[in-house]
Image (cartoon, helix red, strand yellow):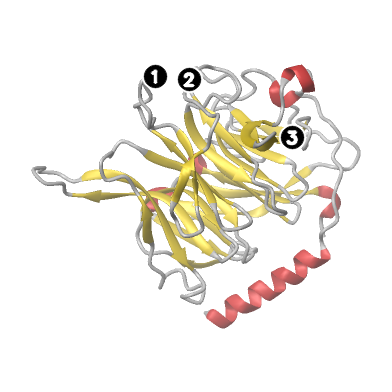
Amino acid sequence: MRSHIVIVMIGSLLTLACQEAKFPIDSLPVSVVNKNIGDTVYVQQYPIWSGFNHPSAIIVGNDFLIYVADTYNDRIAMLDLTGRVIGYSKTIKRPIALAEDKSLNLIVCAQFDTLLPAHVSPTTFGAVYKMDLVSVGHDIAAGNFKKVFYEPTDSVRRYTGVAALYDNRYYITRTGPKNELTRIDKDIAVLLFSATDQLISPVSNLTPEGTGLLSIHNLTGIATMPTGRSVEFVICQTGDVALYKVQWIRLIAEGQTTNYLSKFYPSVDGDIDFLRINRFSTPRGVTLDPSGNLFVVDARLDSLYRFSPRGVERFSFGGTGSGERQFREPSGVAYFDKTIFIADAGNNRIVRFKLSTDLR
């Protein structure tokens, strides 16, 4: 198995090296479905990848292998770029978010049950896990998940998103019901961790109050830039209170201090697509490509959205169903080699779309 994985990784590296050309996609009207401008359009690829039970997240790792949070099967699936299953992890309860750092550690947001003193039934906690894939030769079935973070005094908190940075630090999104104005340590937060899994601090300037930019509510996902040394990130959230359900946050130096602020503001950027109030309903997954284009999947609108680095909506499509360009509760999205991978949770499948100008 290990020799096969080495061959897959070498082949993928050669593929990446030969296919780094950027591609332009012209602007499309909002909610245009199955329509192209010129000869640029994402075309659904076949076969569809099946065998999952409510897949909630998908990533293409730094090892050029694909990982799927097979949520209701309580496992992580490892696939090669052709969709062939290489292996499954040991049982991990309800995995919903994935990332892989530069050292090829797989980071997973999931849950576990434990029996507390004086309780007659187990209590479920949210937790963050890591697996060192290098130490097991990328044999995911042989690897063990190490629980690196959970909060033993608070069983209602859940960790819903994870994204790694260039230096192996990583962000975690956390949700929960306790967010009173008088509470210092509110449940809802974006947490920054060190490469050694130490909680550094919650991200400043984000607050679970209000409705506008920098307000955070039911966080559902997070993404960082896959290249360079940027620490900016994009978060998605749900709930009726949040007007900006997808927000792009970056670290800005102001004199002797630094603050996390919105990348876009109406007063500066005008009426760009990304800032349209209530543009999304229930965004569950976000990812960025190496050029800074943003992809969002909305689980209620059953749609995929693409935005340029300047917040202009370039290409979006979707619809409820199991046919071509249709989804049911899409919950995860990944990008690699001009291909979009979507964890179509309600249809228990992974669907792929490739830019038509790059079809072979």
Tell me the quadrant of the picture where the C terminus can be found: bottom right
- The percent position of residue 115, horizontal first and vertical second, equals 16, 49
Q: Are the residues flagged by discs 3 and 2 in contact, CB closer than 8 Å?
A: no
Q: Amino acid at mark 3?
A: Phe
Q: Are the residues flagged by discs 1 and 2 in contact, CB closer than 8 Å?
A: yes
Q: Residue at x 61, y 19 (%)?
A: 278
In the rendered structure, the answer to whether residue 167 lies left or right of residue 359 reads left
- The percent position of residue 232, horizontal first and vertical second, equals 65, 42
Res. 99 mark: none
Find disc 3 in the rendering and name its residue.
307
Find disc 2 in the rendering and name its residue.
209
Q: Amino acid at mark 2?
A: Glu
Q: Amino acid at mark 1?
A: Leu
The residue furthest front is 256
Label 2 crowd bin: few (<14), some (14–19), many (20+), radius 10 Å = some
In the rendered structure, the answer to whether residue 334 lies left or right of residue 99 reads right
Earlier residue among tags 1 and 2: 1
Earlier residue among tags 1 and 3: 1
Find disc 1 in the rendering and name its residue.
181
Alpha-carbon span between mark 1 and mark 2 = 8 Å
The residue furthest bottom is 3
